[in-house]
Image (tube, rainbow, N blue to C red):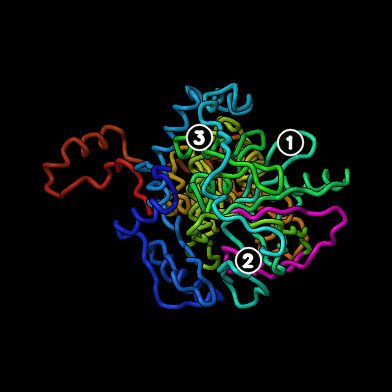
Amino acid sequence: MAFRCLADFLEDLLHGGQLARVDAEVDAREEVAQITRRIAGAAGPALLFGAVKGHDIPLLTNLLGTESRICHALGIASVEDLVERIAEVTGNDQAAGWLDRLKAGVLQTGLAKLAPRTIRSGPCHQVVRVASDVDLADLPIPRSASDEPAPVITAAVVVTSDPETGRQSVGRYDLQVLDARRLALCFDAHDPPSRQLAAWQARPAPMPVAVVLGGDVAGLLAACTALPETLDTYAFAGLLGGKPLELVTCREIDLQVPADAEFVLEGTIEPGEPKAAAGPMGTPLGYYRPATAAPVMRVAAVTHRTNPVLPAMVMGTGPNEAATIASVMSRVMLPVVRAMIPELVDCDLPSCGTSRHWALASIHKTYPGQARKVAHALWGLRQFAFAKMLVVVDATVDVHDREQVLAEMAARVQPPRDVFFAQGPPDPWDPATPQGMLGQQMGIDATTKLPEETQGLLPPRNLPSDTITQLVADRWEEYGLGPDPASPPSKRPSP
């Protein structure tokens, strides 16, 4: 992060008009969420609620609700700058070379200098509460929706480990409060912690879990990214922030967490512990995730800074922090996806599908059936696993321009020929699919068809010649019509 700690970042945002303080008393049950939705829908500032009813701890929402604030937190001017930073650090002369380096492991690549460092103590251990001193009700955890039966922690980085290798897994998952010292962990069967839990229970032994709230923004961004499981998430956070993360060992369990975190909840999932009902809970789509059985974490310790701030992501319809992060990180990861799918030119996860259910991809097409091959390859990646609608277009199409994509679909798609279907893992966020059923996915081939892909001749495109196009471009100033609308912008503007 370009700042020493979260407090410094918030102070900078305040002076820049990108953080608004709310001093009026507000209720964490729905009121905070509704205020945040209205501000996020207008691309407004981050919000710091200083007087949450019944609590002394300030509550922070919409921190990363705009692309510009994400870039500001990382000390970059644009997302493209971040992609260039990653390519430089990893020696990415060619995409395939980058993937090889990622697979080789942190110590064998340019990531080594940005690998996390373990230190003895950090600000997250300034206050330590254990055993009977732990009470999750002290935290101003908001409820985003009226039918949520209990508060849900939404901006947490959850740290677990593999009992065989000791390798840590870091990801963002929702956690619902069950009582003063228990949390329901809402990860799914395809998530790494699910496999790790099965291995711990086979021993049988308690599975250690750490829940990190606040701290370096890069850590949260990395945890929200669908990274290859061979890549160290903490090292990737170092790449994003331009400096290594500093980690400390938890007080009650053997896991490492960022030293500058605002809060750390330490605990275990005990072998044989019955699962608890978690949900329903709101999702970024504006629907409820149905109640499910979830593993129970018993919280043994809560550590935090002396004057902490609790971050939260508000879920719901419209622009929101979770969807903004997913959209930005999908662009950051484009070179990695290209390494696995060489013909891929660009891709986009539109916010209208919360950067999850719609996917658009452009390719260099050279052989029949290539669009279908690319679609299935993308569905095989964690980043695109829940894309219900995946559209593939030609390399000349800007996938970030919705009108262009729709025009290509209108001109290139013959539904019986170009629409195809697949099945994938159940998507807990999909309101159109009954709980527990396999996900249903639709691919649309909107590329130019090769002779082998169609019967009969297709009409040619009506395009101006290169000669007249260049002539008009050269003489545009003579026409006295202002700037040439066909001139490409230097960079796509941030929302």
Q: Amino acid at mark 3?
A: Pro
- Mark 1 element type: loop
Question: Which residue was labeled with disc 3?
Answer: 244
| Depth check, front residue: 429 or 295 | 295
Residue at x 65% of width, y 46% of height: 250
Q: Quadrant of residue 429?
A: bottom right
Question: Which residue was labeled with disc 2?
Answer: 152
Measure the C-alpha gap from mark 1 to mark 2: 29 Å
The 10 Å Cα crowd at callout 3, few under 14, some 14 to 19, many 20 or more, is many
**Magenta region: which residues?**
263-292
| Depth check, front residue: 284 or 277 | 277
Q: Earlier in the sequence, mark 1 or mark 2?
A: 2
Q: Which disc, if any, is residue 166?
A: 1
Measure the C-alpha gap from mark 3 to mark 2: 30 Å
Left/right of residue 385 with respect to residue 225 in the rendered view:
right
* x then y, percent, for residue 426: 73, 56
The 10 Å Cα crowd at callout 1, few under 14, some 14 to 19, many 20 or more, is few
Q: Quadrant of the N terminus?
A: top left
Residue at x 71% of width, y 64% of height: 132
Residue at x 49% of width, y 62% of height: 320
Tally of marks: 3
Residue at x 16% of width, y 49% of height: 482
Q: Amino acid at mark 1?
A: Gly
- Mark 2 element type: strand
Asked if the residue under mark 2 is in contact with the one under mark 3, i.e. CB atoms within 8 Å, the reply is no
The 10 Å Cα crowd at callout 2, few under 14, some 14 to 19, many 20 or more, is many
Up the image or down, 490 lies above or below 349; here it is above
